[in-house]
Amino acid sequence: MTKEEQEEMSIDQMNLQQYKAYERKMAEQAEKEEAARALEEADAMMNQFAPPSKPKPKMTRLQSMKPPPGQKPKMESFYPDSGMSEDRNEVSEVVEGKIYLTNYRGAENVE
C-alpha cells in the first residue's frame, strides 16, 4: 500500500466516523422530540378527564385592604383633623385687597 492509499483510507475512515456521530446525534434528537410529544399527549388526555377547576372568588375592595389574619394593622384608626371653625372661616388674602380665599363656595364682588 502506498502512502496516498493510506491517506485516502484514513480520510474515508474519518468521514465514516463523522457520519456515524451525526446519525447518533439525529437519533438522540428524534428520541427527545418523541418523548416531548408523548408528554404533551398525556397532558392533553389528563386535561380531558380532569374535573373543571373552580375560579378563585373575587375579593371585594374592602377585603383586599384588610391585613392578613394574625397581622396587626399598621394604624389603629385615623381621625382627620380639619382644625377649628374659626380657622376654617378666616379670610386668607392672596393679593392684598383683590384676591382672597375663604372656606365658602362661589365668588363675591367686593367693590
Image (tube, rainbow, N blue to C red):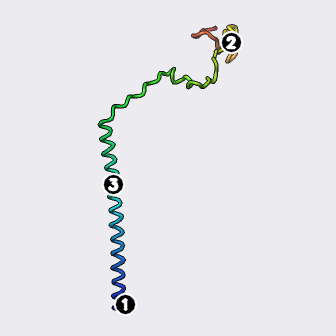
Which label's residue is closer to the chain start, 2 or 1? 1
Q: Name the residue under label 2.
A: 83
Residue 33 percent location from the top left of the image: 33, 54
96 vs 32: above or below: above
| Contact flag, marks 1 and 3 (Cβ < 8 Å) | no
52 vs 4: above or below: above
Closer to us: 14 or 96: 14
Which residue is at 32% across, 58% downward? 30
* Numbered badge on residue 33: 3
- Foreground mark, 3 or 2, reads 3
In what element is the residue under mark 3?
helix
Q: How far apart are marks 2 and 1 (CA)?
A: 108 Å
17 vs 90: above or below: below
In what element is the residue under mark 2?
loop
Q: What residue type is labelled 1?
A: Lys
Query: From the image, which quarter does the N terminus lie in?
Result: bottom left
| Contact flag, marks 3 and 2 (Cβ < 8 Å) | no
Residue 10 percent location from the top left of the image: 36, 82
Which label's residue is closer to the chain start, 1 or 3? 1
Q: What residue type is labelled 2?
A: Gly
Name, please, the residue furthest toward the bottom. Answer: 2
Q: Name the residue under label 1.
A: 3
Closer to us: 54 or 75: 54
Badge 2 local density, few (<14 within 10 Å), some, or many (20+)?
few
Q: Distance between the residues labelled 3 and 2?
A: 74 Å
Which residue is at 36% across, 69% downward? 21
Instruction: Judge left or right: residue 11 versus residue 90.
Output: left
Q: How far apart are marks 1 and 3 (CA)?
A: 45 Å
Q: What residue type is labelled 3?
A: Glu
Q: Quadrant of residue 106?
A: top right
In what element is the residue under mark 1?
helix
Query: From the image, which quarter does the C terminus lie in?
Result: top right
